[in-house]
Image (cartoon, rainbow, N blue to C red):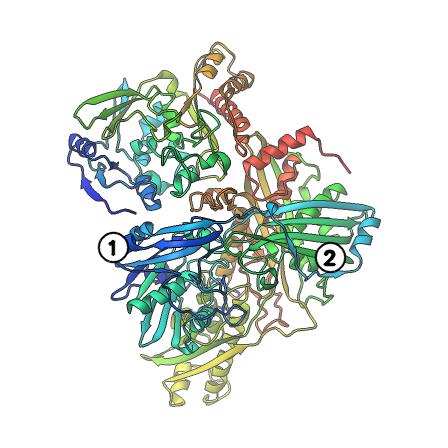
Amino acid sequence: MSTTSPRIGGFADRIDARSKVTGQARYAADVVLPGLAHAALVGSTIASGRVLGVDTARAEQAGGVLLVLTHLNRGPLGDLPNGDGDGLTADPRPPLADDRVHYRGQIVAMVVAESPEEAAHAASLVDVRYEPAPFVVDIDDADATRLADAPRRGDCAAALRAAPVTLDVVYSTPIQHPCPLEPHAAVAHWVDHDLVVHDTTQWVRGDQAVLARAFGLPRERVRVHAPFVGGSFGAKVFTAAHVLLAAVAARRLQRPVKAVLRSSEVLTAVGPRAATRQRIQLAAERDGRLLALRHHTRSHCATDRGVADLDPFYEPTSGVTRMLYACPHYEAVHDVVPLHLAKPGWMRAPGEATGLWALEGALDELACALHLDPLALRLRNHSSRDAHTGKPHASEHLRECYEQGAERFGWARRDLRPRSMRDGDAWLGWGMATATYPGNRDPASVSVRLDRERGRIHATVSTAGADLGTGMYTMLAVVVADALDLPLEWITVELGDTRLPPCPVTGGSNLTASTAPAARAACVQLRRRLLAFRRAPDESADWHELLSRAGLDQVEAVGTTDAVHDDARAHHSFGAVFVEVRVAPELGRIRVTRVVGVYDVGQVVDATTTRSQLIGGIVFGIGQALLEQLVHDPMHGLPVHADLAGYLLPTHADVPEIDVDWLEDVPDLAFNTIGCRGVGEIGITGVAPAIASAVHHAIGVRLRDLPLTPDRLLAALADASARPERAK
Amino acid sequence: MRPFTYVEGVSVADAAAAVHATPAAMFLAGGTTVVDLMKLGVLAPDTLVDVHRLPLGDIELDDRRARIGACVRNAQLAEHPEIRARWPVVGEALQSGMSPQLRNMSTVAGNVLQRTRCPYYRDPHSACNKRVPGSGCAARTGWDRDAAVLGTSPRCIAVFPSDLATALAILDAIIYTRRGDGGARRLPFDGFHRLPGDTPERETILDHGELVTHFELPDLALARRSHYFKVRDRASYDFALAAAAVALDVERGLVRDARIALGGVATRPWRCSAAEQSLRGKRAEPAAFRAAADLALADAVAGAHNGFKIELARHVITRALTELAIRPG
């Protein structure tokens, strides 16, 4: 076993890997408690209307059944909070609040039984009578409401009228789902009138706040555990309805209750990424310099709340289009379309993954129209400041990403003309796009404790934040190992527990930037305290010896990070992604054969997990581009193919070798003391437009609707052969 | 899932008799379809008779034929060297479907008898004549992108999903069964699966309690030159949008005999006899293959979203035959 201490930026082995591959890591659904009862949910079979009556008699008489909860007997629950800092729910009304149905699959009853099988069987015996009402599940079929927030600069309309070159195109994205492989699950139990919940959540403190409000408890009497979470991608921010109902049932039964969603329930009742329709209007000089950009988005929202009450969420597509490129005239308009579906939520890079699909696609079209290299067009419009606020980026190295990515990929050899590369009976194409994601940072606290243990020192690092499987355990261990010169084996990390020091939601790629500086700050305090016990300034720091001199068995410090308050500068990560595709047009088949991504994410803390995150993001982007869509039946409102055999995620065979790298020595020290920005989301950004750009390069056909499925490609080819693309 | 009685089959005859005696009983083999559909509430047998330990798990070969037990795992059949040499289309079809885990678990008979992936069949609350006769067909007015374009009826457009069955359709396969009353049957593969017509709930000509025991593949010279070609949305673990099982007997550049079956586009394994006929005596090259493909799809009828399958299936047939024609040996 190695006893050298890893350094920030090096490749460390994941400290939680062994516990995961040996099954020791305990996820929420793994929790077994004495007397555990099991819940099964009953989802609405209509998309809109009212529950006229629920006959629970047969279910209640079925073997093993302990309780059937409906809106008629659920009992009181307080109103739920729904603002940042206080926890979030998809619906401000508690579950089973009344008889109204807003989407197909909405929970209308929950059965609790001795075994999961008995609960599932009894759930099928709950007889719900409905009064259906008209509904709409197609974003193109419903009226929209314009949001008041319409960022603008300059005079877009005038610039669009006057410009020598214009482009006006519509890009669309379907409903896509974060679809974590670990389904949502919760175990709730009451211990001496205190509520304890094991949940699949990105935010134990958010859960705690919601549950405290719902049950009228002070926060400290609700404890939430989420030591391990098996993927989330945004799907586990909201405190879900089944968590609240499990707690209701546990209190009623005075027994622990477990609720595990089926994948069909995850896909139906957990909010997806909203569908979007995005019209991009560009005006440019003939040399490619952008003059104006107008971005008009339609995205869907839920029907069960007034549009004025839409906050805190709609798919924020224009966040990225307003800031990325130098462009004097800009306007974004956003319409929301209420649909009878579960309220949309966050999915990896919400807004960036969708907004860049439209913007980068349009730029590729502009490059083609002007016979410019797509990379040259990006360079011509490069901005070293946030183009909307005008704030300079504190640390921005996008041009180096372009340069290094192009070099690794061999971009210079690209022929501008479509249909220029043939390989057997397929066409090859190369495309590229810009990647970007904001640097986010939130207040966080991390404690580091040193214990003298059997003749050596042991460090324990603790914070309430949840590791979604991405590497936070290892990342924090590396920070502490680096700061205190300890081997990883001497460090334990504790996460995902409301009793640990406060930490924000794991979201918006914020957690490394928030907790790593806090962990280091704690280490700095410990060093200062213990180094005072050195006998000479050059004496090496043996923490065990210094603790014993101090007469202590244990010493602890808490470090904190503040919210970002840098009004003078902007903080963003950037990257460049290059893609090769192989297209068999007559088969409608697109396969990604090569991806190169080079990123500026500030100072990398742990190279192993950073590399995983970036590769994972690119795989996510391949899914977004080629496979993923949740389709709803227009007549009945049900999601078709709502399982993992039908909602297609990329398999190994869909994913080529992915070459990722990042710039070294580019810490964003104005952002935090380590100079790190999070890497959870930037990997997905730019991938889908780079793939579509490569498809166009391969066969000269422009696809603007995700995903790029065989039927779409065949239809576009038929269309293109009927109406040959006119050169501008 | 409804509570049910689980019975382990002691012998082939007992297992068949046990299901025969109970109207809502079903056989259970690999469980990858039946258990799945029970969890969804689509199937609700009151008794499951487990046949996977019965002595139906062997592959026997001689010069005249292969005899494949009904409970041979799909992985075992796919990887069998002699099967791969003499009937390459079988291994190729199996390798192009499922995940390795499913191939390890599921059986050959279960594969041939697997149920449609039509989302309305799999949702117990949707109208589906196959699941509840007379309830209607939600697919016709709904999301029919994956539905069949051949062999449909006003009552059902559900596509038949099995890759293996598509391969068996060109191999003159024979299915051997044991009936619940003790009798046995020898059924040609062609005609084993029924068209939906007015009774889409009846998918094969098997009677209740009739257990498939073996498949026989007669030795067939042209099967040595056979091939499976499949197009799907993702590169692995996905059902066909269109697939073709083909075999060619070519002498001095002329087609002596050809076999073509389509998968992923029809309501049952879809043998293309007219297309096969059209190739006899023609030069084994793409122009003839394209003409044959046009014939194979001549009667195709599309709904709102699955029209692309017609053109795609034409290309798939052409591609499959072209790849096979240039294959050495």
Residue B247, by quadrant, is top left
N-terminal of the two: label 2 or label 1?
1
A156 sits left or right of A707 in the view = right
Label 1 crowd (10 A; few <14 / some 14-19 / many >=20): few
At which x and y percent is residue B161? 40, 33
At which x and y percent is residue A697? 65, 39
Disc assigned to residue A331: 2
Q: Is residue B225 above or below residue B30?
A: above
Q: Residue furthest top?
A: B281
Assign a secondary structure to mark 1.
helix
Q: Is residue A465 visible?
A: yes
Q: Is residue A320 above or below residue A423?
A: below
Q: Amino acid at mark 1?
A: Gln
In which chain is the residue bearing label 2?
A
Q: Residue at x 51, y 25 (%)?
A: B301
A523 sits left or right of A409 in the view = left
Disc assigned to residue A156: none
Judge by depth and name the residue closer to the eye, A267 or A525: A267
Disc 2 to disc 1: CB gap under 8 Å:
no
Distance from label 2 to label 1 (Cα)? 61 Å
The residue singled out by tag 1 in the image is: A61
In which chain is the residue bearing label 1?
A
At which x and y percent is residue B294? 53, 19
Q: Is residue B12 above or below residue A321?
A: above
Q: Residue at x 67, y 45 (%)?
A: A170
